[in-house]
Each structure stands twice: as structure tokens, then as C-alpha cells.
Image (cartoon, helix red, strand yellow):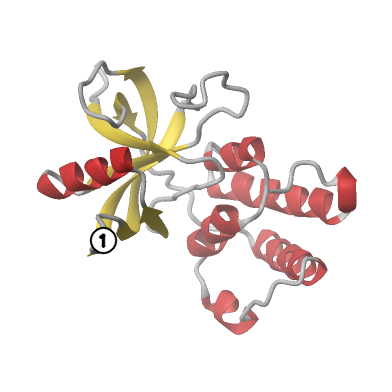
Amino acid sequence: MTDTTRLSIFPLPGALLFPQLHLPLHIFEPRYRAMVSDAMARDRRIAMIQPRPDSEDADTPDLFDVGCVGRIAEVEALDDGRYNLILQGLSLFRVRRELVVTTPFRQVEAELLPVSEDDTLSLGARASLEMESRRFAEAHGYSVDWTSVGRLDDVSLVNGVAQIAPFDVAAKQALLEAPDLATRAEMLVQLMQFFGRHDGEDRVTLQ
């Protein structure tokens, strides 16, 4: 039987977290301020997951099945009750069921997913991703320190680009759920090529 764990979830469209990477968050809604206080008193874990964009209930939207649980690595408590956080990604998870709770924030029973053992790219795949990233950044006016990018290991490069890329919710979710690093890198190249060719009103899936 698969082991499951109880997770407090933060549904946020367009926000991805990957294992080993970091995600800055500004927490201001009362229910999520309560979630941070609860996490700090227990295990410092907060689970990031995307709501489905076609959900009819904006306050309690349907969720995708896969997200990433993070540990609060840094926290700044502001005078008015808000928080600035840095989440460190721990593990991807799959939602098994949503729990009935009395807390203002939602909780789920989830299965933590194993980390893929395939954590390197071929030289060709790495070169293709770096080349397409440069083209995409230049086309959209992003300033990037490419010397620092070149020093990143394959996991940090692929997941870092996937985490910050301005794609729509469905594309971001597909990247998160990719079965291995090589597949995610290939998807990134295809997405950047596609979005790089679509500007103006045609670029309907860029946030």
C-alpha cells in the first residue's frame, strides 16, 4: 500500500515549485497567513498546487492532481501579519483526496512521488535548451546572466526555466508532470519555439 501524508495546500495559478529549487512567496490573505502559522508550529511544510483554470468555484477551485511540497527555508513576519517566505522544494506529490477540515486553508491526503533517477541531459539536448532560452529571452526583452546559466547543472537549468517561464497554467502543469528531465527539457524547447512565434493577440496562452 502506498504511503500517504497530510499536506496543507496553497493553490496558486502559474506558480510552480520543483524539488531542490526555491520559490519566493508573499503571503497576505488571512487563510494563508493562518496556514503559514500552522506550518511553522508543525513541520514547516506547504504544498504548492495549481488550480484548474476552468473551475466554476473561484473560492474553492478544482485542483490539478500533481503539485510540489516545499519546506519554509526562510520566513519574514511583517508587522501587519503578512509574511515573506522562501520555499525550498522537497518532493512532487499526487493528491489522493481532499480532506474535510475546520482550518481556513485546504488540506489533502497525498502520495509523495519518487524523484526521477535520470537527472542529466545529453550534450545536444543541453545545447538546444540553452540556445532556445537565449532566443526566447531576447525576443521578450529579458535580461539574463548567461555566464551564470552556463554553470548550472542540468536539473537546476531545466527546472529553473520551467519554474519561471511565462507560460499558461496548462503548459506549466505539463512541465511539472513530465516523467523525466529529458522530456521536460524537450517540452521547454517546443514551448519556447511556439510562444516565440506567437505575438500580440495570437499569444493567448502567455500570462
> Which residue is at 33% across, 19% downward?
98
Q: Is residue 139 above or below residue 202?
A: below
Q: Name the residue nearer the viewer: 47 or 66.
A: 47
> Which residue is at 52% across, 26% downward?
58
Which residue is the extreme one toward the left?
Answer: 41
Q: Is residue 162 above or below residue 7?
A: below
Q: Is residue 63 above or below residue 138?
A: above
Which residue is the extreme one toward the front?
Answer: 80
Q: Name the residue nearer the viewer: 196 or 11.
A: 11
For this view, does 81 lie left or right of residue 167? left
Q: Name the residue nearer the viewer: 88 or 116.
A: 88
Which residue is the extreme one toward the bottom?
Answer: 147
> Which residue is at 39% across, 51% downward?
19
Amino acid carrying label 1: it is Ala
Neighbor class of circle 1 (other Cα within 10 Å; few <14, some 14-19, many 20+) is some
> Which residue is at 53% across, 63% downward?
154
Q: Name the residue nearer the viewer: 72 or 180.
A: 72
**Residue 167 percent coordinates (x, y):** 67, 48
**Residue 34 percent coordinates (x, y):** 23, 41
Q: Secondary structure at mark 1?
A: strand
For this view, does 105 lie left or right of residue 49? left
Name the residue beneath numbered marker 1: 73
